[in-house]
Structures are given as structure tokens and as C-alpha cells.
Image: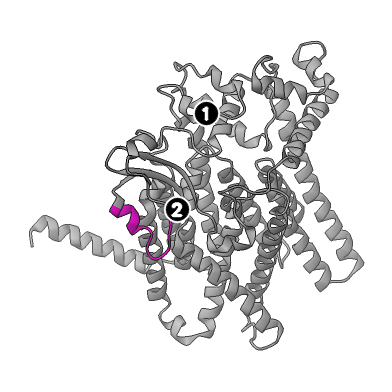
Amino acid sequence: MPPILASVVSRTKAIANKLWNADDQTLRWILGALILILACFNFLRDINTPSNAFWDESYYVTAAERYKEDKAQFASHPPLGFMFMDLGQSLDRSNDKVDTHFLGEVKKLDTRVIPKGYDFNAIRMPSAIFAVIGALLFYLIALRLTKEAFEAFVFSLLFVFENSFIVHFRAAHLDSYQLTFTLGAVLVWLTTFGKDPKRPLLAFAAFGILCGLSFMTKVNSLVMVLLCGITLVRSLWTERTRENLLRSLARGSVAAGGFLATVAAIFALHVVLNPNPPEAGTKAGDRDLRAMSQTYKDWLEDKRPLDLAVLWHGSYDYYKYMKGDFTGSILSEPNGSQPILWPFMHKIINYRWDFDGKRTAYTQMVGNPVNWGLGVIGIVGAASLIIARRARRIGDDGHVEDFNRLEGIFAMFMIFWLFHIYLGTQRVMYVYHYFIGLALSFMLVSLVFKIVARKVAFLDKHRFVVLCGISVLIAASYLFYAPLTYHQLLSRGACELRNWPVKMVVCQPMKKRPSEEATSL
């Protein structure tokens, strides 16, 4: 062996030996850094591909343009996500020389009229960065649940290599912000559930603030505030004293106060940051003006100073606009999904496809089947373990905290799922509305594995090999479907290969003369 190669092999073996024998604290930092690297590679690359708006970007590109021009406006969702897009535009000035003014004149954009040279990095990058933060938060949650670095790393791969997260979070959508703030809230909640945190009021306030930030991105995460209720109800059930009742009321009040203060602050910030009136005579401007109270209009037209009345009316007008938009929602459409079937990845969405005459590139909202399958195993396994425990068929083995957390997260998953099943009767829902539930199911997987490994000797003995096998399956499945995630060109045969054993994509073009039917690259 050449001396240089022998030296490299020797150094590699030495590093591997140090890692293998590293203490748990060191290993946590090393594997956390690896999660960061993998997340950056998966979420931050090829942000401008495809270089066309797709799915809800047709709405959000227009909202981002009005934010860029500091125009007062309303949208179907709260304003926080649009503020991050605007921040991205402020930091990335790539579009400054492009005429983008007309984008803000409508609420929904015809994606074929994106100005030449428009760069999507500015409004997509903040979402991708939040996804990286979300991956780190999930790793910290997994560490708290498993208390073992390598297990936490493996189960964090469920987040890092989740194709549906990657395709959705690398776009100018709102879900990355929502899920990241929700994961932050879950991480704080874990410090309060079943034990007293060092600074309880601060912890509950932080939980309320994070839930408020998540809610001010997309309102369906409101249900997650019930995690606080689960903590307080459990505390009251285990210690039924007057002192504990007063203590729980104080903590609940602090959490509620943090939530409400955050909501009020974000609405007020939206009003203050957008002092220019909507552009009358445009479709978007006229629609916003019709929804504005006179007090709000007077301030925008410099007829009165900024005061609490203006902040109140501007915020309440926004709320009424969202409520009216929700009331008028359709109940079904071809891409709509049934929430009861969400754990099985019901209704994959083709966001976009482009044909170059020989091959087709897809932007497909398809998940990693291995991850979703493990999620189902986590849900079923958690239900089975909880029933067996309550029926006294299995014991806690001295690990009561694991079972308590399993029950708490499973209860939150069921509340989230049932709430969205109800929402599905009120408006059309899509499979990406399940992202919070999917993340909760991944948490259940880690806890179920931990508990079952203690009770099954074979699994405990071969734990490392099993975890390595799970990692390989997760990564291999991600790579197999990555072309659908990253808008990479595929031949017809390569596309059809992705439909085995389950149909994942309708291979395009469908007709004999595709050049007449497909969009050009």
C-alpha cells in the first residue's frame, strides 16, 4: 500500500476509533453537527429549481411583492410567514433590477407570467433555513426522548430525509415556519411534562409564545396549545391539592398570556410595517380596500395618527378577512385529501412537471414511504403499548417517564388527527396539512423502539445493527424518490420505476404529441 494511502487509512481508523469510544456528550455534539450538515445539503440546495412558481407560491409571490412595497394587505393566512419572505427579499437583492411591481396587483398569479430573470432564492431561502433549524430541534427532541445519542441521530433522519418536507420546505410555502415553531413548543413542553422545570413560569411563557408564532403562520396549529392542557391536567390528577390548582392556573395563564401577546404583537407589527395604502384599481388592492375599516384607511391615507384604535382595527380587519376566506372555502377538489387517510400518504400532489422533448422533470409532493411506514408503526405500536400498560399486561420496568411521554405525545397526535378530520368536513384539506402529525408519529417511533427494545432480548442485543439497517432504508428510499423531489429530469422508464410497488407519480406526458401538451423547460 502506498505510504500516503496507508497514512489516510490509519488516520481514518484512529478517528473512527475515537468516535466509537467517545463519551455520550461528545457523541451528541458530533452527531448533531452531522444532522446539521445533512439538513443543509438536503434543504438548502437548488432553491431556485424549478424557476417557476408552483402550488401556493402563486399566492405568496404576490403577497411578498406587496410586502416589498410596504403595502397594507390581507391574506388567507396570518402575516408572519410573509414577513419572513419579505426579510429574505431585503437580504437578497437579486430581483432589484427586475420589474416585479405587477406581481402585487393580483392575489393569485398566473405562473406563466413570472418576469424574466426572477430569482426565487429570496423568498424560498427563509423557509429552507427554518427547515434546517427544524431538523436540529427534532434532533434535540429525539435526544430528550431516547436519552441516547445514536438513537436520536437515527430517528432524526426521519426528518432530514423526508422527501415531502424537502419539496415543500424548499419553496415559498408557510409550513416550514409553522412546523419549526411547533417543534420548539414540543421541546419546551418536554421540560414541563411529568416534572417541574427550574423556571416553570418562564417555560410555560416560552411554550405559549412558540405556539403563538406557529399559529401566526398557519392557524391550524392552534390545536397544539392543548399540549399545555395535557401537562396541567396530568399534574392536577396526580396531585389534587389547592396549592397545585393555584399553581396550575398560574402556569396556564402565563402560557395563554404568552400566546395572546404574540398574536397581538405580530398583527400590530404587520400594520406598522405596511403603512402604504393598497393600490386602488387593481384586483388585489380593491379587494383589500373593501375589507378595511374606515379607521384603518384614515391612517393609511395620513388622516389620523397611529394609535391603539388603528392597531386594533387593522388587526381585526385581517382576522375578518381570514374568517371570510375560510367560510367560503371549497369542500373538495381533485388534489384534496381525506384526513383520516393521512398516515397512509393519501393523495400525493403533482406540483409541476416540465418536458424537454425527451425527459420530464417533476416537482412531486411525495413522501418517503419508509418514513411514513415507520410512522404508522409508531402510531399502532404506541396504541398497543398504552393499552397493554393500562390493562396491566406489561409493566413500566422502572421507566415510568417513557410511558408517560408516550401517552402524552400519542394523545396529542390523536387530538391533532381528529381535529383535522373535523376540519376536513368544513373545507378542502391537503396531505401537507398532516406535517405536524407526521412529526409526532416520528416521535412515537423513537419511544416505541426504546420501550420495545427493553422488553425484547433479540432487539436489545442487536440494537445497533437494527438502527443501522433503519438508517440505510431511510436514506435509500429518500435517494430513490429524490428526482421527484428536486425537479430532476427522468426518462419515461425511470419515472415508471418509481411506481413500484406503489404508484407515486403519473408519468408525463400522457399523449402522443407531448410537445403540444407540456410546459417547456
The magenta span reads 493-504
The 10 Å Cα crowd at callout 1, few under 14, some 14 to 19, many 20 or more, is: few
Q: Amino acid at mark 1?
A: Asp
Q: Is residue 169 above or below residue 276?
A: below
Question: Where residue 411 sits: x, y (%)?
Answer: 70, 67
Which color scheme does this rendered protein use?
A: one colour
The image quadrant of residue 407 is bottom right
Locate residue 176 relative to residue 492 in the image: left or right.
right
Taking the spot 35% from the left edge, 68% from the top edge, the residue there is 20
Residue 294: percent from left, percent from top: 83, 19
Which of pointers 1 and 2 lies earlier in the amino acid sequence?
A: 1
**Which residue is tagged 1?**
110
Q: Inspect the magenta stretch and tell me whether residue 109 lies in it.
A: no
Which residue is identified by label 2? 163
Q: Quadrant of residue 27?
A: bottom left
What is the quadrant of the N terminus in the image?
A: bottom left
Q: Is residue 518 visible?
A: no
Q: Is residue 205 left or right of residue 477?
A: right
Residue at x 60% of width, y 20% of height:
105
Residue plotted at (47% across, 22% down):
93
Q: Is residue 46 visible?
A: yes
Calculate the distance from the C-alpha at mark 1 to the C-alpha at mark 2: 27 Å
